[in-house]
Structure formats: structure tokens, C-alpha cells
Image: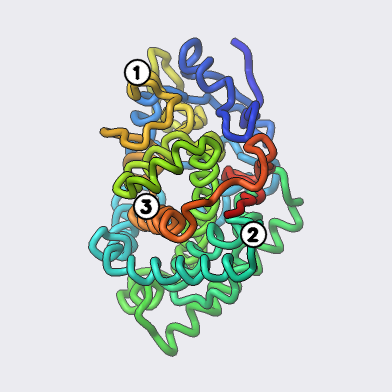
Amino acid sequence: METRRFPFRNPAPLTPPDEWAELRKQCPVAPVTLPSGDPAMLVTRHADVRQVLSDPRFPRAGADAARLTDTDDGGLFNSEMAQTLPQQGEAHQQWRRMISKWFTVKRMRTLRPRIEAMADRLIDDMLAAGAPADLKAGLGFPLPVWVICDMLGAPDSDRDKFSYWSDTMLSLTRYTQDEMRAAASDFLAYMKDLIEAKRTAQGDDLLSDLIAGGGLDDAVLAYTGQGLLVAGHETTANMIGKMVAMLLADRSRWEALVADPTLVATTVEEALRLDAHPGLGMMRYLTDDLEIGGQTLPAGTSVMCSMGAANRDETVYPDADRMDLARKPNTHLAFGAGPHSCLGQPLARIELQVALSALLRRLPTLELAVGPAELEPVEGLAVGGFKAVPVRW
């Protein structure tokens, strides 16, 4: 069985890797080599990915788990943050419960008007500066950074620091080991200072709430804030740009939304499903033998779940490669599944819906300022996206 290098390359910016469909049909549990050089088994079918992600027995890392990178800690899932935050069992579920009350649908509805006001302010700035503009820099990045900073009680004026620190934490090949180590140290020191400041003067924010509740030591608090800052802005910032690029690449999609904005919510879900640059995927380490797709994998195997490939599984989604703005049901796996599914998915959905609605309302004539083939993918990071999304109106 051929061992392939992973992640795969996209034949065009908005086109998924050819290997996704090939492996789903011919080899749904396939051996791959990660950027670190370590081996893993790649799972590409929807049912199999859901099975692995939903099984609470399998953690993200183990003592001899595959590393994402060839650095000392092996990358995000093997980092000190991953080792410090509770990853399994009741401790993990208790930690999630403490965090998740800040991401309920009810709280998101309360937060939505403020997100809408910020989106309008950012679009005002884009209009004042004039076209062409970089949608990622003008809206995609600053909107989710502002939101997560507001929730954590961190100053959004530090957003450029957060961006750099996030990139280094998500690095596969972009940064050197020394750069990654220095950034991790600086980021952790920043979070510890922020937590100390909140012990003195607590506010109405998530970190203050966790401090007041007790039960988490300073290391867990610091890595919780760090993890939420990374997860809370990096993926959504990239997804706003990718979503709009998908819609503008075929003008009829954008025009359909301008004509019927009630399609925004289902369009967001479809963009998440069809994302051709979803990032590396989610790693699981098998602590017991597991049968996946008719193949038994022994304990000690590292399994990489490709949500991007699973989200185009033809056995689950009729006409899976077509963007259907009204698709229902849409049981995509963009946010994972099971005990480690994305805590912030209610927030991500609100941010994506608000960003898209604001653009449709304020800039109905929006179009790409470059051809879709000229969009440049981000390289060397565990998350996927474009370096810039040039637009005009």
C-alpha cells in the first residue's frame, strides 16, 4: 500500500486535493507521512471520521504518538499546552463545562448586536480606504480577534501579537524551532500577566469568571486563554475569507444571496462543508485496537481524521462537490465530533453569519479583484486559508 506525504496539495485554490476522492473510494484508511516524517493512518470517509472522533477512549496524543512537526514538542497536539489542559475523562468534561457556558446559543444571541456593530465599523473603514481591499485584513481577521479579546478581557490592540503567536503555535514548516519556542514563551508570559491583572481587578469576561470560580491553577488558566485566543480567531478569520471567495468565484451564488438573504445561515454551513483548505485535520492516538472501515488498527497507531475529505463523502451528501446554498440537512464535520468537538462553534457560526450578512447588505456589488486561480494559499500552517482575499465593489 502506497504511503503518501500529507497534507496534500490543492490543484487550484478553491479545488480540493484529488487524493480526497481517490482515497475515499479506494483506500479510506491510508498510510501517510506527516510533515514531521512520522507515520499515521489517514481516515477520509464520513462514517469513519465520525467514529474515531466520537470515541472518548482515544486522546489527541500519547507518549509515542506521531508528531506533526520535527520540533522538540512535535507541534500543537504534543505541546506543553496540550499536555497541561485536561484531555480525557471527567477532568476534560469538567473543564469543557466551565468554558462552554460562555459559548451557549443564548449568550451568542446576546452578543450578536455587538458583533454586527463591529462588522459595520470595519466595513466603514474599508469603504473609507476605497477599493481594492484585502477582505481578510479588513474584516476577516479583525472581527473575530475583537470578539475573542472582548470575551477574554484582553485588549484587542494586541491583535498583531496574537496573530504571530497563533501562527507559530499552528506552524508545520513555516517557523524554526527557536522561533516557535520564543513565541510560546512570550505568549505564555503574556497570559500569566493578564491573569494576574484580573486577580487584582476582575471584569465581566471569561478569564475573570474562571478565576472567581476557582478549581483551575494558573497554568491551566493561562493555557486555556492561550488556546481560546488561537482557536477563537485563526480559523474563523481564515474561514470568512474562504467563504466569500467561494461565493464570489461563481457570481450567481453571490447574486442569489443578495436576492434572498434568508439563505445566509445554510450558506455558512455549506461553505464550512465545502472548504477545500480546512487545515491538517484532527489527530487521535489509539490506546486500544480499533476496527475502522473494515481494517483493524493496533493500539499505538496515530490516526489523522480528514474532515475536509469526509465532508465531501458522496454517500452522505447528494451531489457532494456542488455548492448548494440551501442544503438541508447538512451534518458536516467542520467542527469535529464527540468529546473534543469545537467548543466555540456557536460563536464561529454567528461571526460567519454576521460577516456575510453585513457584506451582502453594505457591498452587494462585491467581487474578487483577482481571478480565483490567483488566490494564494497559506503555506506551512496547520490551518488552511488564503494569504489575502483581494476584493472591489
Q: Secondary structure at mark 3?
A: helix
Looking at the rendered structure, the secondary structure element under dot 1 is loop
Tell me if label 2 and label 1 are in contact, CB under 8 Å.
no
Q: Position of residue 187 (x, y in %)?
A: 61, 67
Q: Where does label 1 land, which residue?
A: 315
Amino acid type, label 1: Thr
Query: Which of the two labelled residues, at mark 3 and mark 2, occupies the earlier sequence position?
Result: 2
Which residue is at 51% across, 39% downward?
Answer: 246
Q: Which residue is depicted at the point 55% across and 28% down?
A: 16
x then y, percent, for residue 34 = 63, 32
Q: Which residue is mark 2?
A: 131
Q: How many marks?
A: 3
Regarding residue 29, the answer to whether it shows in the image is yes
For the residues labelled 3 and 2, the Cα–Cα distance comes to 27 Å
Q: Is residue 1 above or below residue 210?
A: above
* Separation (CA) of disc 1 from disc 3: 25 Å
Q: Does residue 139 appear left or right of residue 182 in this picture?
A: left
Q: Amino acid at mark 3?
A: Arg
Given residues 43 and 211, the one toward you in this image is 43
Residue under the image location 46 percent in, 56 percent down: 359
The residue indicated by pointer 3 is 349
Q: CA distance from mark 2 to mark 1?
A: 43 Å
- The picture places residue 216, in percent across and down from the top left corner, at 38, 69
**Nearer the N terminus, badge 1 or badge 3?**
1
Label 2, secondary structure: give it: loop
| Residue 225 position in % (x across, y down) | 47, 66
Q: The C terminus appears in which quarter of the rendering?
A: bottom right
